C-alpha cells in the first residue's frame, strides 16, 4: 500500500492546492509513482475523466477504448484533474470520488464515483448519503494506493472544524482511513498565522494531532529574518517543525470555486497584470451569472497578452466591451430568468462584437428552452415545464431538458465560422451538461463528430457562436483565431507574443522545492522523497 501525505489547512484558500500540486510534480520528477486524491470536494468547476472500471456497471472490455455510450466518463473537481496532470498520471474518478456541486437554494448535486446521485440539502446528505460517500472514498483510495507509491491527498477548508469532526470526509476521515502523515498549511497574508496554526493543532482530534509531521506557511511577503523568531516560538510551543515558508506567488492554477470571482453585483478584471497598456488591450466581458460553473474556461484567454477578462454584473452596459463570452451555468433556467430581469438580454442583442456561449451559455443564446430541468429551482422548473421559455434569441436553436446528463471527454473536428472563422482542425475538450440542442432553421454547424456536424455540438450565425465544448480556448488554434478576431473588432494591433511562462505545475513545483524542506518531510514521513 502507498504512503499517503494529507495536505490539510487552517482554513479555505490558504494554498493547499498549490502545495499538493507542487508535491505531485516534484515526486513525479523524481521517478516516484504518485497520484492525487481528494475524498470530497465542493466545486462547480469540474472536468470529465474516465470512471474507475470497478465503479462501472458495464465496464469496457480489456483493450477497449472508453466511449460515451457506456457511461465511461464521470466528473471530478478541476484541482484533482490538474494535480493528476502534475503527477503525470491519467486522472480517473478515483482522484475525487465524492463531488458536491452547489446549485442554489441550499442544495448541491451529489456526485459519487463521477455519477450524479441527486440533489440534497446538507442535512439530507449527512443523514442519508454520507456513509455511502465515505465507503466510495475508502474504496477509491485503496485502489490508488494499490497502484502507486505515494498518494498526495488534499483536505478541504479547515481540519479543525469541531462541529464536523464526526463527518469530515476530506480531512479527518481521510487522515484516519489512509493513516496519512499530515502537512498543515497556514496563510500568513490573512494575519495571525501562528494563532491559526496553534489553534488548529489544539482543536484537531487527539488521534490526528500525532500524525502532523510539519507546517508550511504560505503567501509570505517581507523579510524572512523578521519571521524567524515566530517560527522558533511556534516550534518550541508545539513541537511541530515549520518545514517551509512559501512566498506570495500565483502559479496560475485553475480556480476551484466562485469564491475567486467577484460578487454578482461587482465588476472585476483578470489578466491586467501583463504590462500591456490599457489603450493597447481589449476587453472580453463575461456576465457574472449567479450560478456560474466551469469559469476556468476563461483562464486561457486571461493569460493572453493584452486580453482583459471583465466579469460584469447582469445590469452592466456592454459599451466598453470588445467581445462577450458567456460561461457555463449549473442552472441554465434560473440564470436565464436573472438575465431577463436585469435586462442583460437586451444588451446582448444590441451588442455588435463577437459573442461566444459555452455549454449553458450556448443554451442561453438560443431561441427557446423546454422540457424538465432537474437542475432548476422549483419555481423555474415549474415555469419551464408549463411552457417554452424564450431564450436570448441570438442563435436559431432550441434546447430540450431531460433528466439524463452527458459527461464525456471528446475531440471534435472544427470548420471555423463566426468568431472562430479560420480555425480548422481537431479540437479537444469535454462535455458536462443536461439538455440537448437542435437547430430550428438552417444554420452553420462548425463542430463535427465522426463526420457529422450538428447543432447538438455547436452552431454559429454572424458573429455569434455557441458550443458544448468546455476547454475550447485551451486549444491554441481556437484561442489564437478568437483573440485575433477580438483585436480586429476593436481596431487594435495585437501585442507581440511574450515569452511563455513555465506551466502552472512547474511553477507550483518550484515554489515547493525552493521553499520547503523535502529532506525534513522525507525524514518524518519515512518515505524516500
Image: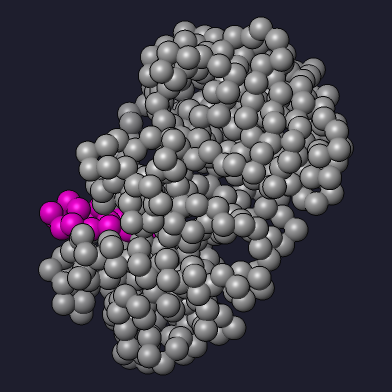
Q: Nearer the viewer, residue 283 or 477?
A: 477
Residue nearest the viewer, comparing 424 with 276:
424
Residue 473 visible, this orientation? yes
Question: Which corner quadrant holds the N terminus?
Answer: bottom left
Residue nearer the viewer, 311 or 81: 81
Give the extent of the magenta segment.
17-36
Left or right: 528 with respect to 176? left
In the rendered image, residue 89 lying in the magenta stretch gets the answer: no
For the point 71% across and 23% down, which residue is it? 398
Q: Using the image, determine if residue 149 lies above or below residue 123.
A: above
Which of the 4 image quarters holds residue 381? top right
Kindly indicate the quadrant of the structure image that contains residue 211: bottom left
* 202 over 271 or under it: above or below: below
Residue displayed at 34% across by 38% down = 66
Can residue 486 be seen here? no
Q: Of helix, strand and loop, which mostly describes the magenta segment?
A: helix
Q: Name the residue located 59 percent from the left edge and 32 percent from the top edge.
A: 359
Quarter where residue 267 is shown: top right
Q: Residue 528: horizontal and vertical position, in percent?
A: 12, 68
Examine the rendered structure and indicate whether residue 481 appears above or below residue 185.
above
Amino acid at each position: 500500500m502507498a504512503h499517503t501525505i494529507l495536505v490539510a489547512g487552517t482554513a479555505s484558500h490558504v494554498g493547499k492546492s498549490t502545495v499538493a500540486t507542487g508535491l505531485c510534480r516534484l515526486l513525479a520528477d523524481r521517478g516516484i509513482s504518485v497520484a492525487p486524491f481528494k475524498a470530497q470536494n465542493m466545486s462547480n468547476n469540474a472536468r470529465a475523466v474516465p470512471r474507475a472500471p470497478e465503479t462501472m456497471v458495464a465496464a469496457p472490455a480489456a483493450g477497449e477504448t472508453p466511449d460515451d455510450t457506456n457511461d465511461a466518463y464521470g466528473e471530478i473537481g478541476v484541482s484533482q484533474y490538474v494535480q493528476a496532470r502534475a503527477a503525470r498520471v491519467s486522472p480517473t474518478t478515483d482522484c475525487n470520488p465524492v463531488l458536491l456541486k452547489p446549485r442554489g437554494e441550499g442544495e448541491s448535486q451529489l456526485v459519487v464515483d463521477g455519477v450524479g446521485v441527486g440533489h440534497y440539502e446538507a442535512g439530507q446528505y449527512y443523514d442519508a448519503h454520507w456513509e455511502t460517500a465515505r465507503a466510495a472514498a475508502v474504496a477509491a483510495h485503496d485502489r490508488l494506493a494499490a497502484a502507486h507509491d505515494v498518494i498526495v491527498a488534499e483536505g478541504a477548508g479547515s481540519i479543525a472544524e469541531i462541529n464536523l469532526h464526526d463527518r469530515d470526509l476530506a480531512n479527518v476521515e481521510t487522515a484516519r482511513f489512509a493513516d496519512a502523515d499530515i502537512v498543515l498549511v497556514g496563510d500568513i497574508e490573512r494575519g495571525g498565522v501562528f494563532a491559526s496554526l496553534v489553534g488548529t493543532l489544539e482543536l484537531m482530534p487527539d488521534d490526528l494531532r500525532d500524525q502532523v509531521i510539519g507546517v508550511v506557511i504560505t503567501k509570505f511577503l517581507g523579510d524572512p529574518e523578521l519571521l524567524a523568531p515566530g517560527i522558533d516560538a511556534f516550534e518550541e510551543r508545539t513541537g511541530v517543525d515549520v518545514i517551509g515558508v512559501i512566498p506570495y506567488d500565483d502559479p496560475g492554477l485553475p480556480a476551484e470555486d466562485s469564491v475567486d470571482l467577484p460578487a454578482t453585483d461587482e465588476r472585476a478584471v483578470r489578466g491586467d497584470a501583463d504590462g500591456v497598456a490599457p489603450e493597447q488591450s481589449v476587453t472580453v466581458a463575461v456576465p457574472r451569472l449567479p450560478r456560474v460553473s466551469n469559469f476556468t474556461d476563461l483562464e486561457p484567454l486571461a493569460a493572453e497578452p493584452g486580453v482583459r477578462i471583465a466579469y460584469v454584473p447582469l445590469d452592466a452596459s456592454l459599451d466598453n466591451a470588445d467581445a462577450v463570452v458567456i460561461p457555463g451555468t449549473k442552472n441554465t433556467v434560473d440564470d436565464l430568468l436573472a438575465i431577463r430581469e436585469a435586462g442583460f438580454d437586451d444588451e446582448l442583442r444590441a451588442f455588435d462584437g463577437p459573442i461566444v456561449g459555452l455549454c449553458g451559455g450556448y443554451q442561453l443564446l438560443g431561441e427557446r428552452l423546454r422540457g424538465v430541468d432537474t437542475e432548476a429551482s422549483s419555481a423555474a422548473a415549474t415555469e419551464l415545464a408549463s411552457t417554452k421559455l424564450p431564450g436570448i434569441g441570438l442563435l436559431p436553436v432550441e434546447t430540450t431538458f431531460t433528466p439524463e446528463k452527458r459527461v464525456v471527454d471528446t475531440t471534435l473536428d472544427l470548420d471555423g465560422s463566426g468568431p472562430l472563422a479560420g480555425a480548422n482542425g481537431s479540437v479537444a475538450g469535454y462535455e458536462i451538461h443536461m439538455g440537448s440542442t437542435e437547430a430550428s432553421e438552417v444554420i452553420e454547424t462548425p463542430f463535427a463528430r465522426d463526420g457529422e456536424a450538428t447543432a447538438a455540438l455547436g452552431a454559429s450565425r454572424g458573429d455569434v457562436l455557441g458550443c458544448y465544448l468546455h476547454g475550447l480556448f485551451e486549444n491554441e488554434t481556437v484561442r489564437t483565431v478568437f483573440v485575433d478576431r477580438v483585436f480586429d473588432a476593436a481596431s487594435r494591433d495585437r501585442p507581440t507574443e511574450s515569452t511563455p511562462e513555465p506551466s502552472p505545475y512547474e511553477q507550483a513545483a518550484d515554489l515547493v522545492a525552493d521553499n520547503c524542506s523535502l529532506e525534513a518531510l522525507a525524514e518524518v514521513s519515512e518515505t524516500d522523497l
